[in-house]
Image: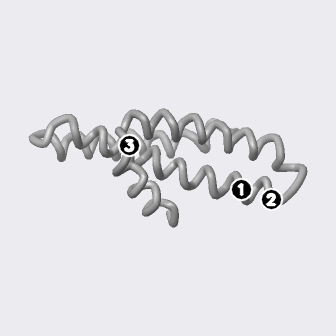
């Protein structure tokens, strides 16, 4: 959550689809760091946590920016759809780990 301010400032300089693409690739990189180095040293966990948090925020900001650029007349409906889809995704993910 702390990195949200920096990701918002970063998104001011790039296009939203570029931010989504770059943050998705970097999320995969930091997830690989977590997976490979998680059992080896605690610094890998700290670096992965900071990277995952910051680029997840960047991805979320770019998705919302893209969503708000679609149509200003349908803003409340698009926002409700986005919130419901993200909350349903977050509810499903923990059950996939079992």
* Quadrant holding the C terminus: top right
Q: Residues within 10 Å of mark 3 (few under 14, many from 20)?
A: few
Whole-percent x and y of residue 3? 51, 61
Report the side of 54 relative to 80 (left or right). right
Q: Which label belongs to residue 68?
A: none
Decide which of tag 3 and tag 2 comes sooner along the chain.
3
Q: Residue at x 26, y 45 (%)?
A: 80
Q: Which label belongs to residue 43?
A: 2
Give the spatial CA distance, label 3 vs label 1.
24 Å
Q: Residue at x 42, y 47 (%)?
A: 60
Q: Give the image quarter of residue 26.
A: top right
Report the side of 46 relative to 65 (left or right). right
Report the side of 97 relative to 54 (left or right). right
Whole-percent x and y of residue 86? 42, 43
SS label for mark 2:
helix
Toward the left, the furthest residue is: 73
SS label for mark 1:
helix
Is 19 rendered above or below residue 48? Answer: above
Whole-percent x and y of residue 10? 42, 52
Q: Residues within 10 Å of mark 2 (few under 14, many from 20)?
A: few
Q: Which label belongs to residue 47?
A: 1
Give the spatial CA distance, label 2 vs label 1.
6 Å
Along the line of sight, the residue nearer the viewer: 11 or 79 = 11
Residues tagged 2 and 1 counted as in contact (Cβ below 8 A): yes
Q: Which residue is mark 3?
A: 14
Along the line of sight, the residue nearer the viewer: 90 or 65 = 65
Residues tagged 3 and 2 counted as in contact (Cβ below 8 A): no
Q: Residues within 10 Å of mark 1 (few under 14, many from 20)?
A: some
SS label for mark 3:
loop
Whole-percent x and y of residue 50? 63, 57
Tell which tag, 3 or 1, sits nearer the viewer: 3
Decide which of tag 3 and tag 1 comes sooner along the chain.
3
């Amino acid at each position: 959550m702390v990195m949200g301010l920096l990701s918002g400032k970063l998104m001011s300089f790039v296009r939203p689809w570029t931010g989504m693409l770059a943050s998705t690739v970097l999320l995969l990189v930091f997830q690989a760091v977590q997976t490979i180095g998680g059992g080896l040293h605690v610094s890998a966990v700290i670096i992965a946590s900071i990277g995952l948090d910051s680029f997840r925020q960047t991805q979320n900001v770019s998705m919302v920016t893209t969503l708000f650029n679609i149509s200003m007349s349908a803003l409340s409906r698009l926002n409700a759809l986005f919130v419901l889809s993200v909350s349903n995704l977050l509810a499903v993910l923990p059950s996939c780990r079992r």
